[in-house]
Image (cartoon, helix red, strand yellow):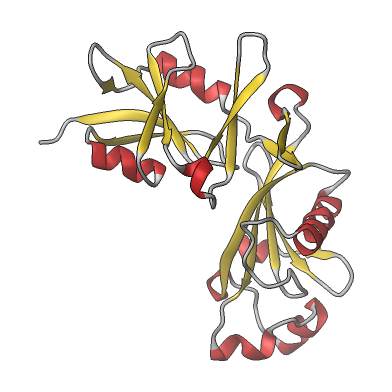
Amino acid sequence: MKEKMRILVVEPVKRPYVKEIDHTLEEMQKVVGGSIQALYPFEDRVGLICNDEAKITGGFTPNRALKDENGNVYDIIFGTFFIAGFGEEDFCSLDDDLIEKFHKYYEYPQLFGFCGSEEEKMWINETHPPIYTFHLWMLKDTEENKDYLFMSYRHLKKSGRKIKKADYEDVYDGICVGGENDHRIAENVYASLNTEKPADYHARTFSMGDILVLSDEDRNEKAYFCDTFGFVEVPEFLS
């Protein structure tokens, strides 16, 4: 039986989570999506294992910042990474205390802005405005869905069609800072995806009939239908 190792996985725009993997190079590479690089930025006996080529090859989302002892950012980790314990000669499982410590350290996703070639960070952990994750859902490209594309909420209800998650696919996930209310947050996401077009956004234009699911810091989810003007809450999408 292969030896198991308990690690803390940190994905972009998500909270950390504990995972148990086989203690093999192949499994570690699978977690980070490629060749691994080990960093040791902490005094604790832990290693930060990330993708060795994530920053070079492109296509990986900025994840978390590394800071020096003065709190200054000196590097940014791209793509998924994980924290593992470090034994006498090799990585090992994290104990409960270290899991708790680094879960708290990396609890909140970070946003990164780019100005020319300089990477400027918004340090959400310290300023800590409300942070939301969002998922954009669009109707699947099927024959039976064709007549319902870009349909307003009123016409959809009039047709008798029910809004079911099974008819949609999750096309893009991201994070955003909270606003006055959920409707304002949804409008900001709509504007951002349709005007700024993030580099990793490859779906069609965010349009009427699409569903935006917002999740707050306590993982409370609400679903909103993009309508003719603004958004309509559709709790049935989550049921």
Q: Which corner quadrant of the image does residue 46 belong to?
A: top left
- List x then y, in percent, for residue 139: 61, 76
Q: Residue at position x 79%, y 41% from top?
A: 178
Work out whether 208 lies above or below 39: below
- List x then y, in percent, for residue 215: 66, 47
As rendered, which of 73 and 3 lies closer to the eye? 73
As rendered, which of 159 and 216 lies closer to the eye? 216
Classify the position of the C terminus by image quarter. Answer: bottom right
| Residue 223 makes an appearance in the image | yes
Does residue 25 appear left or right of residue 229 in this picture?
A: left
- List x then y, in percent, for residue 125: 69, 25
Work out whether 111 lies above or below 95: below
Does residue 121 appear left or right of residue 104 in this picture?
A: right
Q: Residue at position x 57%, y 64% from top?
A: 170
Work out whether 87 lies above or below 168: above
Q: Residue at position x 36%, y 29% from top?
A: 7
Q: Residue at position x 51%, y 44% from top?
A: 56
Q: Which corner quadrant of the image does residue 128 belong to?
A: top right
